[in-house]
Amino acid sequence: MSNSQVSDLLRQAGLRLTAPRERILQSLLEAGAPLTQEQIAERLGASAPNKTTIYRTLMSLAGKGLVHRAYLGERTWHFEPAHHCSQHQCHPHFTCTRCRKTRCMTQVKAPLLALPKGYRLERQSIRIEGVCSACTARK
Amino acid sequence: MSNSQVSDLLRQAGLRLTAPRERILQSLLEAGAPLTQEQIAERLGASAPNKTTIYRTLMSLAGKGLVHRAYLGERTWHFEPAHHCSQHQCHPHFTCTRCRKTRCMTQVKAPLLALPKGYRLERQSIRIEGVCSACTARK
DNA sequence: GGTATAATTGCAACTTAGTTGCGTTTGTCT
DNA sequence: AGACAAACGCAACTAAGTTGCAATTATACC
């Protein structure tokens, strides 16, 4: 995604254009998988913004709905862009129990569950653990 | 669940019978919702086992499949008994965005997702956020 | 373009959740 | 009852995320 498109996303969300925001959002858009604060910092190299700034940026992006926190069950948070998500859910996340890699299963469609009377579903997320195709192949 | 049933569970799992284990497993069985280490300690009062022991106990119970870690998206882990779970998934968890309470939706049935060729599903878990019936009623 | 102002940043110090090492205690097997 | 491994408790530690505050910078307005 081009730099100007990233800027547009930020502007449309009513956020000020700053270098850290553009770089962080850009790196999430480039990555195919949810990233942690640390992974974002790595990708941005020596000139990466301060860790506090990364967290605060992720929070404000999440607050505007540009980014989601993915709950992968580890002790660290992962973030990913929200642009492929529908209103009530994004794609399932698959974590391989052998290689520990997490993939976004954008091709898998999951129905929204029907909740008991009185409950309103705002957001549904599905996490799957198992063995990925690469690990299955390598036996 | 009676004390002797709890002991049986531990014995069948091949775990030694110790006071902390029985009390921790019992408290998870009594609670209707996933609990954190801290919540377990609270429930057990002043004579609660050491925090380290609680964590280690939860890990060994989880290792034997008596207990599952539920990923509720906070920074803290939650544990719940596994006795109502099927092999590949337990019930969905519902967290209310207003009162922040989490409920186990044991009555809601979710199909296992079909994954692309080469992937093996070992465990699927579903997290739902929304408004619970109590909060809906109270408007 | 210059300036005022509030939002944003970076740093350091802090909090919280979970972990590790190690000496002591306890359950189980015989 | 005794041996021995497993489990426990404590204290010190690590990792992830948070807070306060002073310095910087994006935007709005002239």
Image (tube, coloured by chain):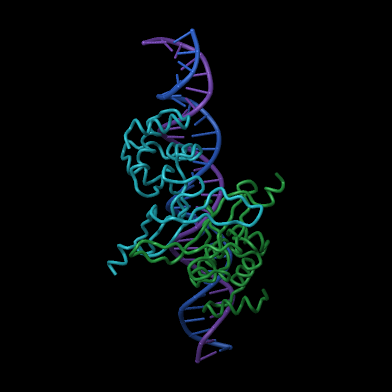
Chain colours: A cyan, B green, C purple, D blue
**Height in image: B4 above or below C18?**
below
Figure quadrant of the N terminus of chain B: bottom right
**Which quadrant is home to the C terminus of chain B?**
top right
The residue located at (44%, 43%) in the rendering is A82
Q: What x and y, as percent, mark residue B21?
A: 59, 71
Which residue, as the protein is rendered here, is positioned at the far left? A138
Quadrant in the picture for residue A48: top left
Disc count in the image? 0
Q: Residue furthest right?
A: B138
Residue B136: x, y in percent?
68, 48
- Residue in the foreground of this view, choosing between A59 and A46: A59
Q: Residue at x 41, y 45 (%)?
A: A84
Position of residue B82 in the picture relative to residue A92 (left or right): right
Tell me which corner region of the image, top left, top right, bottom left or bottom right, holds residue B12.
Answer: bottom right
Q: Is residue A49 above or below residue B71?
A: above
Query: Would you place residue A39 above or below residue B105 in this image?
Result: above
Q: Is residue D14 left or right of residue A46?
A: right
Front residue of B69 and A136:
A136
Q: Is residue A96 left or right of residue B15?
A: left
Q: Nearer the viewer, residue B73 or D24?
A: B73
Q: Nearer the viewer, residue A66 or D20?
A: A66
User: Where residue B40 sits in the image (x, y, percent)?
Assistant: 62, 61
Q: Residue at x 41, y 47 (%)?
A: A36
Quarter of the image for residue A28 reads top left
Q: Position of residue A68 (x, y in %)?
A: 46, 45
